[in-house]
Amino acid sequence: MQLIRLVGVFAVFGVALAGSRAEAQFESRSNASVCLNQANWVYQMADGLTNLTGATSTTVCPFVDDIGVAGGASGFLRFSPPPTIRNINFLNVHGNKVGSSGLVTVSACVKAFGSNSFTCGLSANTATAGQYALAVDRSAWRTFFGDFAYLQVTLTANSSISGWWVST
C-alpha cells in the first residue's frame, strides 16, 4: 500500500512539473512547394521553386499559422502552443541565386482582411551568386498579426527559393 501511495505521489509531482514548464520554443522548416507557381517557374526537388522565365520575376509563398482547433494545437501544423506570426522572432529564407546581376529580394507581408490592401516589412536582399540565407524583417507580421501572412519573393532568372525556417 505504501508503495502505491509513493508511486502516486511521484506521478502527481511529475505531472505538476510537466505542466509548469515554460512554453516550448517553436521551430519550423517549410519548403517552397507551397509557393504559388507562376508561369515558367518550376519546383525542382534539388533547388526548390526556380524562376525559369529568363527575367526577374516575383512569386508569393503563404505562411500558415492558423490555430485550427479552438484552444488547441493547429489542425495543419499540430504544434502546441500554436505559432502565430506575431510571436516569430527569427525568419530565414534560403535558396540559390544564379549570376552576378540583379537582386534576390524577400519581404514578409500581410494581405489585409476585408480589403484589397497589403503591407510588407523591409526587404532583405542579396546580389551575391550562390546559396543565400536571408534574415527577413517581420514588422508587418507583428503589427498586422490578424491578417493573412505571406512571403513575397523576387528572383533573378534561374534563381530559386528552397524554403524558410522560423523560430519563436
Image: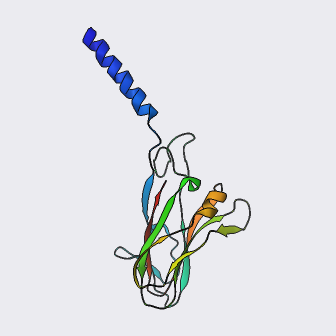
Of all residues, the one furthest to the right in this rendering is: 115
Along the horizontal axis of the image, is 75 left or right of 120?
A: left
Residue 55 % position (x, y): 52, 90
Residue 36 higher or lower than 68, as above or below: below
Residue 127 % position (x, y): 48, 85
Q: For this rendering, which residue is in front, 3 or 111?
A: 3
Q: Is residue 47 visible?
A: yes
Question: In which quadrant of the rendered image does the N terminus lie?
Answer: top left
Along the horizontal axis of the image, is 153 left or right of 27?
A: right
Residue at x-position 44% and y-position 84%: 128
User: Number of callouts in the render?
Assistant: 0
Q: Is residue 49 visible?
A: no
Residue 13 higher or lower than 125, as above or below: above
Tell me which corner region of the image, top left, top right, bottom left or bottom right, holds residue 71: top right
Residue 62 % position (x, y): 55, 65
The image's colour scheme reads rainbow
Residue at x-position 34% and y-position 75%: 46
Q: For this rendering, which residue is in front, 37 or 55?
A: 55
